[in-house]
Amino acid sequence: MAAIFYSRLCIRNSSRLANSLARPSFASSTISFSPRVQSVVFKKTVHSSANRKAELEISPSQPSAHWKGERFVSVALLTLIPTGIIYPSAVVDWALAVVVPLHNHWGVGQVLTDYIHGSSMPKVAKGIWLAVSILQFIGLCYFNYADVGICKAVSMIWHM
């Protein structure tokens, strides 16, 4: 959704830029281009089970904050995995124990949102997936605390 909003903003501003560049240089001594972002409220139509439509107002900061969090977790994984291979340590183990379940929870949650439909099945599926994600986090934390740690365990599996 953010990409669509950004592309629409760029298309609007590119036509303004083209108009300003088409003028002769003597018409304007300084050409300044600064895109103006206005306060936008997205409206989402929600269909309930009683065939009534309701519109929800979504602030632009809510989806972008979640999107930024997902990107942060992805970049953290991109740095933690090579770090765990090159320099395994307890800090990397505990960071992986937090980041991997969170990344899995958000990713599979989106798959469940896209492919499970109905009135009660999405809630049941997401509840089960939340329980699995919590168990995954607890299991990785226990493994780090009581055993050799995630990075060392992967290294031991590779050396079999």
Image (spheres, rainbow, N blue to C red):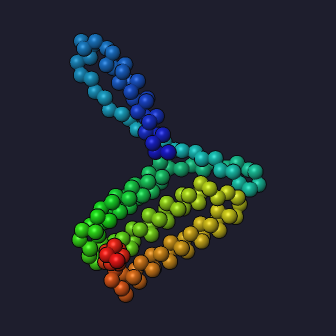
What's the residue at 74%, 56% (across, down)?
Answer: 49
The reply, left or right, for residue 63 in relation to residue 45 is left
Q: Which residue occupies the foreground of this view, 51 or 72?
A: 72
Number of labels in the image equals: 0
53 shown above or below 111? above
The answer to whether residue 20 shows anywhere in this view is yes
The answer to whether residue 93 shows anywhere in this view is no
41 shown above or below 106? above
The reply, left or right, for residue 32 in relation to residue 50 is left
Name the residue at the right extreme: 50
What's the residue at 55%, 74% (across, down)?
Answer: 131
Q: Which residue occupies the foreground of this view, 5 or 62?
A: 5
45 shown above or below 131? above
Name the residue at the front extreme: 160
Residue 109 percent coordinates (x, y): 54, 61
Residue 126, picture quadrant: bottom right
Residue 105 percent coordinates (x, y): 49, 65
Residue 141 percent coordinates (x, y): 40, 80
149 shown above or below 81? below
What's the residue at 41%, 68% (across, down)?
Answer: 100
Residue 135 percent coordinates (x, y): 50, 77
The reply, left or right, for residue 136 in relation to residue 113 is left
Indicate the quadrant containing the C terminus: top left, top right, bottom left or bottom right.
bottom left
Name the residue at the bottom extreme: 146
